Amino acid sequence: MRINDEIEIADWELTEQFVRASGPGGQNVNKVATAVELRFEAARSPALPDAVKARLRRIAGQKWTKDGAVVLQVSETRSQARNREIARERLAEMIRRALVAPKKRRKTRVSLNQKRKRLDEKKRRSAVKALRRGDSDEG
């Protein structure tokens, strides 16, 4: 399975299992295993660098198993072949998202002018509220 120009997933890393789907389908739903369960052995994959595996683990969330596999279940259509395509597309998209390294966050400082503006505004609001209170010494 080709992800991009550099990365290709080998067949031994993917396991497909077909199970009966729930939901609509009439009598067919009880006879034909149309839902697909795609399992990708991500932790053991030589095609993915460690940094990509770490990002994939975060992206996959609950789909990541304890033994380092990504398990996708698809039962959207009544066609086994279409469900298989959808599962493979989703896996490829997940891996493509994991390939993009997030930008490093640079710390920035608030400018002195912005601090001064904020404090001036606070003083102005304070003065308005003090006028509303009518600060007097009467008890």
Image: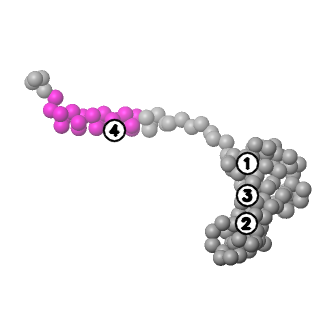
Q: For the residues labelled 4 and 2, say whether their Cβ atoms are less than 8 Å apart.
A: no
> Looking at numbered disc 4 in the image, what kind of residue is underneath it?
Glu
For the stretch drawn in magenta, the main secondary structure is helix
Classify mark 3: helix, strand or loop. Answer: strand
Q: Residues within 10 Å of mark 1 (few under 14, many from 20)?
A: many
Res 4 seen here: no
* Quarter that holds the N terminus: bottom right
Q: Earlier in the sequence, mark 4 or mark 3?
A: 3
The correct choice, above or below, for 104 with respect to 91 in the image is above
Q: Earlier in the sequence, mark 3 or mark 1?
A: 1
Q: Residues within 10 Å of mark 3 (few under 14, many from 20)?
A: some
| Residue for badge 2 | 20
Q: Quadrant of residue 74?
A: bottom right
Q: Is residue 114 left or right of residue 129?
A: right
Numbered badge on residue 121? 4
In x, y percent, where is residue 44? 86, 46
Numbered badge on residue 72? 3
**Whole-Å distance between the Cαs marked 3 and 1?**
9 Å
- Dot in front, 4 or 3: 3
Q: Residues within 10 Å of mark 4 (few under 14, many from 20)?
A: few
Q: Closer to the camera, 63 or 26?
A: 26
Q: Earlier in the sequence, mark 2 or mark 1?
A: 2
What residue range appears in magenta?
116-135
